[in-house]
Amino acid sequence: DLARRLRDVTDQDLRRASQAMHAFSMQQVQDDLVFWRHVVLGMTCNVPSAFEEARSVSTPAHASDKDPMCLFGITSPKWQACCPIDCGSCEEEGCQALPAGEDACCPQKVARAQRPCSSSIAPCMLSAASDASQQGSCN
């Protein structure tokens, strides 16, 4: 029965079916868009405290004004300094030639600046607590 029906279908019948399926799919997409617009509108209009909750969310670590463990910088081999990512490395050898400059990329200069990572971001000096925790276990 199915084989006979398929044999009798013309190209024009297939085009019409394809166009109808396309129109149906487009209507589904439009219906979904309308639904989600209403959901978002309902969330913003009917829940005034949603904005207050969003404001109370804590600042993500990467947007902080301090980086005590140098998570967003490059640590020097001896964990004395945290250089900015822009440096590409945080080693004495060749640090003067790096784009961010020696004040940011040379570990000894960074450490001498006495700018602790506990209260600032790279370039900064890592504390003894950071040093001990980095050389300890992963617990």
Image (spheres, rainbow, N blue to C red):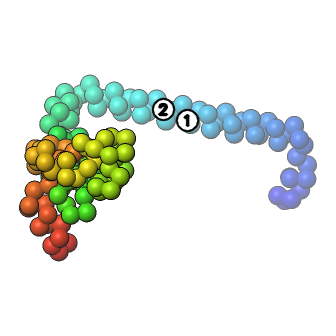
Please name the residue that numbered disc 1 is placed on: 29
Indicate the quadrant where residue 50 lies.
top left
**Residue 74 location, x and y as percent?**
28, 54
Q: Nearer the viewer, residue 96 or 133?
A: 96
One can see residue 84 in this view: no
Residue plotted at (46% across, 29% down): 34
| Res 82 visible | yes
- Where's residue 68, x and y in %? 14, 52
Three-letter amino acid code at the position of disc 2: Leu
Q: Quadrant of residue 37?
A: top left
Q: Residues within 10 Å of mark 2 (few under 14, many from 20)?
A: few
Q: Is residue 133 left or right of residue 7?
A: left
Q: Which residue is mark 2?
A: 33
For the residue pair 54 and 112, the one nearer the viewer reads as 112
94 or 33, which is in the foreground?
94
What kind of element bears circle 1?
helix
19 sits left or right of 116 in the view:
right
Residue that sits furthest to the top in the current view: 45
Q: Residues within 10 Å of mark 1 (few under 14, many from 20)?
A: few
Q: Contact, CB < 8 Å: mark 1 with mark 2?
A: yes
Regarding mark 2 in the picture, which secondary structure is present there?
A: helix
Q: Is residue 79 above or below residue 51?
A: below
- In percent of the image, x 35 and y 52: which residue is there? 94
How many marks overall? 2
109 on left or right of 41: left
- Quadrant in which the C terminus is drawn: bottom left
Q: Looking at the image, which residue is at 91% across and 53% down?
A: 7
Report the residue at 17% width, 74% height from top: 137
